[in-house]
Image (tube, grey):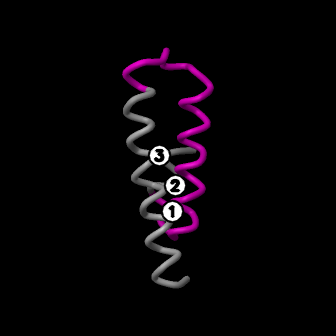
Amino acid sequence: MTLELLEKFSDALMNFENALQIQLKSLPSMDSNIAQTRIRMGFLYCRLEDADKASNEF
């Protein structure tokens, strides 16, 4: 994986983390948008080869 791609994945992950924090404050805990954000974060962690963090999101 190239450095440029790693940076893009890291930026995307940061954006998902920010979105998740907003969602957790403003949506019911079982809202499907929260689940979708966590799943997307899990896939990003998989691409970054961080299985432990990925499994926490799934």
Which sits earlier in the primary sequence, circle 3 or circle 1? 3
Question: Is residue 14 part of the magenta span, yes or no?
Answer: no
Mark 3 or 1, closer to the camera: 3
Whether tag 3 and tag 1 are in contact, CB under 8 A, the answer is: no
Q: Give the main secondary structure of the magenta stretch.
A: helix
Q: Residue at x 42, y 18 (%)?
A: 26
Identify the secondary structure beneath mark 1: helix
Label 1 is placed on what type of residue? Answer: Ala
Q: Is residue 30 left or right of residue 53?
A: right
Q: Position of residue 25 (x, y in %)?
A: 37, 21
User: Which residue is tagged 2?
Assistant: 54
Please state which amino acid type lies under the numbered disc 2. Ala
Residue 51 tag number: 1
Q: Can you tell which quarter of the image residue 20 is in?
A: top left
Mark 2 or mark 3: name the one nearer the start of the chain: 3
Say which residue label 3 marks.
Answer: 16
Label 3 vs label 1: CA separation?
17 Å
Looking at the rendering, the stretch of residues picked out in magenta corresponds to: 24-52
